[in-house]
Amino acid sequence: DTGVSQDPRHKITKRGQNVTFRCDPISEHNRLYWYRQTLGQGPEFLTYFQNEAQLEKSRLLSDRFSAERPKGSFSTLEIQRTEQGDSAMYLCASRRQDNYGYTFGSGTRLTVV
Amino acid sequence: AQTVTQSQPEMSVQEAETVTLSCTYDTSESDYYLFWYKQPPSRQMILVIRQEAYKQQNATENRFSVNFQKAAKSFSLKISDSQLGDAAMYFCAYRSGGGATNKLIFGTGTLLAVQP
C-alpha cells in the first residue's frame, strides 16, 4: 500500500493556460474522488469515479473542468483557460467499495497568476 | 441537502490537557456516517475517528472520543492528554449511508493549536 499519489505537488500557471493534474489511487481501490479546498474552507466535492465511469459531477465543476479515469486506474483533472478563482488545493481520495475508509493524497496546490 | 457546521474556527489547548471540538450537522436521512479528519500542515487528510449513526455507543480511538447526540445532530470530538503532534486543522465530515456516490461533506474546519 503506497498510498494515494498526486502530481504535481505545486503548480503555478498564468491565467488562461490549461493545467492537468494526476492522481494515482491505491491499486485495489475502485472508487476515486476529487475535491477542491480553498484557503480557510473544508474540501468541496468535485467529481466521483467508480472504476472508469464518472458517476457524479458537482455543480462546481464548470465546463472548463474535465476529469477522466481511463481503465479505472489513475485519474486526471484538467482545467482549461484557468482563472484566478481556480487557485486552490485539489485533493484526490480513493477507497474500496466495501470499505468506509477514504485515503487522501497530499493534494496539488494550484496558483493562477 | 446535508450541511456540516463547525463554529470554532480556532481552538487552543495546553499540552496534556483535554479539548473538545464542536460539530453540528443537518440531514433528513436516518442512515449516515460521521467522521473527524485531521489535516496537518503537510496537508494529507488523515482519518481520526468514525461513527455510524445507527450505533448508540460513542466511538473511541485511544485519546480520541466523540460525543454523538443524534437527536441534537451534534458530533463533538474530545482529545484527551493533548500532544504537540495533535496540532492541525480538524474537519468534521458527513457521508450518506445510501446512494451511489458516498461522497464526504465537510465542515469549514477548526484549527487546533497545542501550547507546550
Image (spheres, coloured by chain):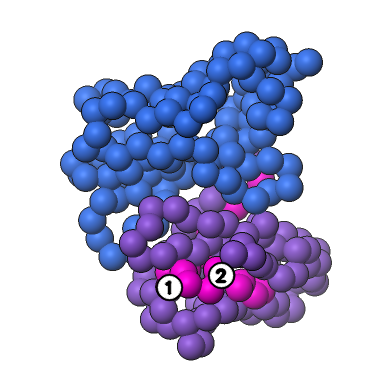
Chain colours: A purple, B blue
Label at residue B93: none
Q: Nearer the viewer, residue B45 or A99?
A: A99
- Considering only vertical position in the picture, is B11 above or below B45? above
- The CA span between labels 1 and 2 is 9 Å
Q: Reading the chain from its start, which is encountered first: label 1 or label 2?
A: 2
Q: Which residues are magenta?
A: A21-39
Pointer 1 and pointer 2 on the same chain: yes
Specify whether residue B42 is painted magenta.
no
Residue designated by label 2: A25
Residue found at x 67% / y 57%: A106
Image position of A41 (left or right of B15): left
Quadrant location, the N terminus of chain A: bottom right
Q: Please, which residue is most extreme toward the bottom here?
A: A71
What amino acid is labelled 1 in the image? Asn
Report which quarter residue A17 is drawn in: bottom right
Mark 1 lies on a secondary structure that is loop
- Considering only vertical position in the picture, is B63 above or below A46? above
How far from the left and from the top, in percent, is residue B11? 62, 21
